[in-house]
Image (spheres, rainbow, N blue to C red):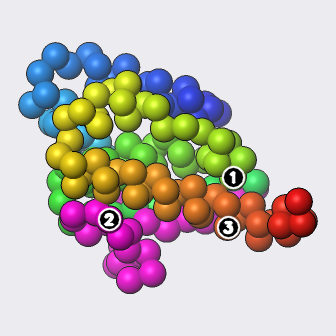
Amino acid sequence: MQSIQEKADQIVKELNQFDDWLDKYQYIIDKGKELPTAGLEIKIDENLISGCQSKVWLTSEYRDGRVYFKGESDALITRGLVSIVIQVYSGSTPDEILSFEPKFIEQAGLSQHLSPTRNNGLLSMIKQIKLYALAWKIKNNPSTLKK
């Protein structure tokens, strides 16, 4: 299984193969098309990410010590960003998620080329992913709170 860093490096490599930002946007849109449809059950207010211009729903589940994410969005580019974030973080342990710094956003040029509202939305998604990881860590190891 690839580490978060390896998955992030792969995204950076794939995005940086394009010189033109229109091609990068198309890549992001295509990533969104690869995202499995999460279904209506995910589209509830408690899964809605605040801070995103478009509607983004994100949920998680914990299996065998790892956190897996599902996401959905009502906008093409944002759906692609959801897909990228899920690809990078899903399948990792809570500790891996919590300790990983999302430098891949800058390395891929996303923070420089996305609109400020999309960039804030992307950071909000990552913040929510880290909150889910922390919640799963505490739920499955309550002694973490006693430190």
Label located before the other in sequence (2 or 3): 2
| 119 up-or-down from 8: above or below | below
- Check the picture and name the quadrant holding the N terminus: top right
Q: Which is more toward the observer, 119 or 64?
A: 119
For label 3, the SS is: helix
Where residue 100 appears, as percent x and y from the top left, is 60, 39
Identify the residue under disc 1.
Answer: 94
Identify the residue under disc 3.
Answer: 135
Tag 1–tag 3 contact (CB < 8 Å): no
- Check the picture and name the quadrant holding the C terminus: bottom right
Magenta range: 35-64
Identify the residue under disc 2.
Answer: 51
Q: Which residue is drawn at 17% across and 46% down?
A: 115
Which mark is drawn over residue 42?
Answer: none
**CA separation, marks 1 and 2?**
23 Å
Mark 2 surroundings within 10 Å by alpha-carbon count, few (fewer than 14), some (14 through 19), many (20 or more): some
Q: Which residue is drawn at 70% across and 64% down?
A: 136
**CA separation, marks 1 and 3?**
9 Å
Where residue 3 appears, as percent x and y from the top left, is 62, 32
Q: Check disc 3 and give the amino acid type.
A: Ala
Where residue 88 appears, as percent x and y from the top left, is 49, 40
Where residue 23 appears, as percent x and y from the top left, is 13, 28
Left or right: 134 in relation to 45: right
Label located before the other in sequence (1 or 3): 1
Label located before the other in sequence (1 or 2): 2
